[in-house]
């Protein structure tokens, strides 16, 4: 009799709770996963590779509680902490498993084996390196890791006490523990990162460090493949896009008598084709958040034109310059999210739209920088990392049509993420001012003002 284990995965869901074009929404996704789990409860594993909570208005305004409620109901087995789980701070992350019944606790472990204290290099106490579950009479170890350089994708002041250590070394360390000390027959690595550069090495690890499955996240790509390495059974690896557009499925075939793995397969299932029906209980859980949904659905304006990411980034930098009363506005391109676009002409633009454009809790920062320092920032902008307000010509090095003067200081407004990023060296400026105002709120007000002055229409010119 054929015996097999099904592993279902999501990554980078980013709070995509409601149905939208190729995103089926959490009710349909959850129903699909529940159906698979109820059909074979002893042979089904459900995992997340991180970045589940932050990204849409309803999810972010509840600090991820709405997603946690439904993940608990579905019965996720584990989740790796992603870089965006840090967006609200470590304290906010820890409240999900602090034992306080007044908080919204996760029923599944949050993993981060290579999140370490920067001073001691010891693993932090608030993230579990691995968890162990049992299916088909076998102990299965699940290790969670993050990419080492993801510290650059997290607000500097949040991550200053921590470091993400080498993934491969961490994987080898805990796989030995799981196999030799914990008696695990199957080991799964769930990385919030694309591990392609080290997958070949993972596929060649010796038996005592052998990894059976690799699940990826973070880059929003979707792929599924197998690597042979030095092993008889290939190593399956997978990443499943973002926002619930795909569900990853890895199947492990086991010998019915020995329980040894003899074959594997993996594929990404396009969610809109497989996740068809909503779930009544999940919809009931969503009803708890009706007031927050109403906030997200507030109409701010009507789009007067088709709006795309590039033009919206320039508009956002201009709004920041005007709103903060500075000489220059500056934002990071990654802060304006590609998934929010296009917004087509005549669309009712809601608070939720703006939240999806700029989902981060970034505060506005103003600082004075010399012409020399701004030229250094322009160098980074050429690499498509930064967007200046429209009064800056990065090709000619001018502001308001006048050439930047090295010795002159200019007032520049940005967001805390950019200011605190070491690569931009903005902390060498003077007359620093941190605002309690969120950049997103400034964008909301800019849309409202434009609409008020233009018969309810929003355009970027």
Image (tube, rainbow, N blue to C red):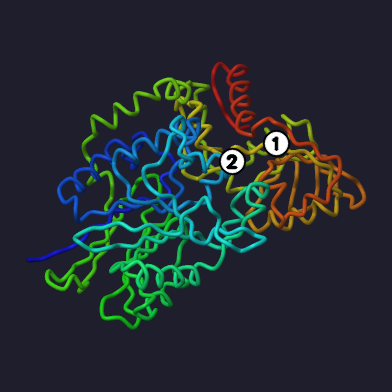
Q: Residue furthest right?
A: 407
Q: Quadrant of the N terminus?
A: bottom left
Point out which mark residue 364 bears: 1
Residue 414, image x, y percentages: 71, 41
Q: Secondary structure at mark 1?
A: strand
Query: Which residue bears the numbered disc 2?
Result: 311
Q: Is residue 375 above or below residue 259?
A: above
How far apart are the alpha carbons under marks 2 and 1? Answer: 21 Å
User: Is residue 209 visible from the viewing direction of this image?
Assistant: yes
Task: Name the side, left or right, on which 282 lies relative to 402.
Answer: left
Task: Name the side, left or right, on which 209 lies relative to 81.
Answer: left
Residue 447, image x, y percentages: 59, 26
Contact (Cβ within 8 Å) of mark 2 with mark 1? no
Q: Quadrant of the C terminus?
A: top right
Task: Write the residue at 63% across / 51% down.
Answer: 159
Task: Write the residue at 63% across / 26% down.
Answer: 446
Mark 1 residue crowding within 10 angstroms, few (<14) / some (14–19) / many (20+): many
Q: Residue furthest bottom?
A: 230
Query: In the depicted view, which residue is nearer to us: 416 or 139?
Result: 139
């Amino acid at each position: 009799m054929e015996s097999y284990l099904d592993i279902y995965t999501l990554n980078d869901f980013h709070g995509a709770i409601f149905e939208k074009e190729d995103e089926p929404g959490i009710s349909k996704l959850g129903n699909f996963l529940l159906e698979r789990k109820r059909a074979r409860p002893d042979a089904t594993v459900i995992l997340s590779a991180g970045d589940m909570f932050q990204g849409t208005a309803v999810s972010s305004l509840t600090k991820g509680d709405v997603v946690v409620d439904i993940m608990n109901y579905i019965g996720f087995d584990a989740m790796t902490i992603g870089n965006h789980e840090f967006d609200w701070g470590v304290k906010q992350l820890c409240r999900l498993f602090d034992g306080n019944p007044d908080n919204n606790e996760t029923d599944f472990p949050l993993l981060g084996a290579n999140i370490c204290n920067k001073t001691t290099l010891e693993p932090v106490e608030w993230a579990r390196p691995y968890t162990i579950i049992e299916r088909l009479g076998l102990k299965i170890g699940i290790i969670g890791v993050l990419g080492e350089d993801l510290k650059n994708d997290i607000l500097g002041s949040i991550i200053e006490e921590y470091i993400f250590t080498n993934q491969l070394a961490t994987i080898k360390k805990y796989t030995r523990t799981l196999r030799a000390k914990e008696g695990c027959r199957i080991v799964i690595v769930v990385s919030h990162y694309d591990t392609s550069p080290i997958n070949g090495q993972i596929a060649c690890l010796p038996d005592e460090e052998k990894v059976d499955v690799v699940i990826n996240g973070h880059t929003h790509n979707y792929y599924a493949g197998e690597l042979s390495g030095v092993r008889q059974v290939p190593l399956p690896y997978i990443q499943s896009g973002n926002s619930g557009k795909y569900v990853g499925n890895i199947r492990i075939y086991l010998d019915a008598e020995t329980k040894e793995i003899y074959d594997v397969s993996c594929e990404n299932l396009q969610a809109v084709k497989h996740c068809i029906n909503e779930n009544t209980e999940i919809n009931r859980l969503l009803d708890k958040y009706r007031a927050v949904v109403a906030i997200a659905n507030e109409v701010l304006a009507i789009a007067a034109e088709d709006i795309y990411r590039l033009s919206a980034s320039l508009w956002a930098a201009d709004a920041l310059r005007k709103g903060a009363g500075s000489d220059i506005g500056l934002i990071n391109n990654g802060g304006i999210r590609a998934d929010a676009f296009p917004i087509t002409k005549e669309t009712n633009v809601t608070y939720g739209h703006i939240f999806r454009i700029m989902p981060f809790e970034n505060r506005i920062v103003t600082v004075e920088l010399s012409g020399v320092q701004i030229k250094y920032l322009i160098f980074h902008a050429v690499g498509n990392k930064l967007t200046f307000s429209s009064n800056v010509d990065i090709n000619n090095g001018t502001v308001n049509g006048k050439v930047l003067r090295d010795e002159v200081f200019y007032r520049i407004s940005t967001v805390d993420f950019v200011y605190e990023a070491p690569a931009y060296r903005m902390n060498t400026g003077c007359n620093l001012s941190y605002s309690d105002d969120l950049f997103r709120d400034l964008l909301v007000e800019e849309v409202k003002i434009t609409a008020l002055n233009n018969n309810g229409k929003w355009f970027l010119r």
